[in-house]
Image: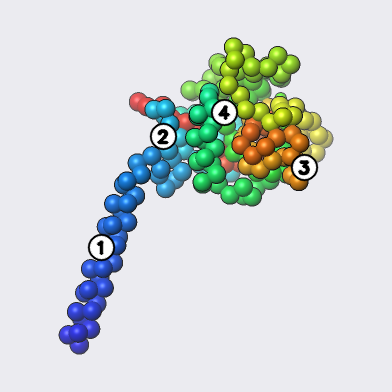
Amino acid sequence: MKQFILKTMLYAVAVLALTVNFAACKKDKPNEGNDGSFEHGGHKYLIVKEKKTWTNAAADAVNRGGYLAEIGSAAEQTAVYAAIVKNVSSTYTQAPDGGGVAYVWIGATDKDQEGSWFWNGANGSSTNLFWQTGAGAGNSAYSNWGAGEPDNFTDDEVSPNGQDYAAIGLEAWPKGNGSLGSAGQWNDISGSNLLYYVVEIEAE
Ligand SMILES: [Ca+2]
Ligand SMILES: [Ca+2]
């Protein structure tokens, strides 16, 4: 009996030691949280794995103290996409008007004026024009559209009002073809798609 108690105690100590060790390991990575959070350029980002329309995702981003991610450079794009790949399955959903692949919302929209793409910045205001269809990137602003995007694809069933909201593709699209975009690039799709999203939060 004594031996049994001793063995049990040793086991308990071992489990405790492993737990403490595990917690210490996690502390070694301050920029990679369990919830898909990370830091880049002094801003914090969240990969929120809740399926929402673009408008509801944007509102939730504001509630969390930020806005849907505004990607202004290749370095920021690389950091955001790496976190998406790490946290989100490329097959978690399919956007019917996005060539049948999965996407994650970012904060760009041309909802106010067709073809004029703004970043939906702090407090949901649309102030930063970065792309005009036909003219391209204003003042050499960064963009990462797929080869055939933004195309405002209009289809009676899946996008009757055109496409006014930007998302990062998790696979090349259309599925099995890939002629319009590669994994990591942006596509304009219908805001009614229910997708995960990236929230960007500036330091206080
Ligand atoms: Ca549009
Ligand atoms: Ca499109």
Name the kind of residue labelled 2 in the image.
Glu
Within 10 Å of disc 1 (Cα), the crowding (few <14, some 14-19, many 20+) is few
Give the mark nearer the N terminus: 4 vs 3.
4
Q: Where does label 1 land, which residue?
A: 17
Within 10 Å of disc 3 (Cα), the crowding (few <14, some 14-19, many 20+) is few
Q: Nearer the viewer, residue 68 or 90?
A: 90
Give the mark nearer the N terminus: 3 vs 2.
2
Residue for point 77% across, 42% down: 177
Q: CA separation, marks 2 and 4?
A: 17 Å
Residue at disc 3, secondary structure: loop
Q: Quadrant of the C terminus?
A: top left
Residue for point 59% across, 12% down: 139
Residue for point 56% across, 16% down: 128
Rendering coords of residue 138 (x, y %): 62, 13
Q: Nearer the viewer, residue 56 or 134?
A: 134
Q: Going by the image, does 179 lie left or right of 49?
A: right
Residue at disc 1, secondary structure: helix
Q: Where does label 2 land, which residue?
A: 39
Q: Where does label 3 land, which residue?
A: 177
Do callouts 3 and 2 mark residues in contact (Cβ within 8 Å)?
no
Q: CA separation, marks 1 and 2?
A: 30 Å
Name the kind of residue labelled 4 in the image.
Gly
- In the image, which is nearer the foreground, mark 4 or mark 3? 3
Give the mark nearer the N terminus: 1 vs 4.
1
- In the image, which is nearer the foreground, mark 2 or mark 4? 2
Give the mark nearer the N terminus: 1 vs 2.
1
Residue 107: give its label: 4
- Position of residue 145 relative to residue 137, above or below, is below
Q: CA separation, marks 1 and 3?
A: 51 Å
Within 10 Å of disc 4 (Cα), the crowding (few <14, some 14-19, many 20+) is many
Q: Going by the image, does 191 lie left or right of 152?
A: left
Q: CA separation, marks 3 and 2?
A: 34 Å
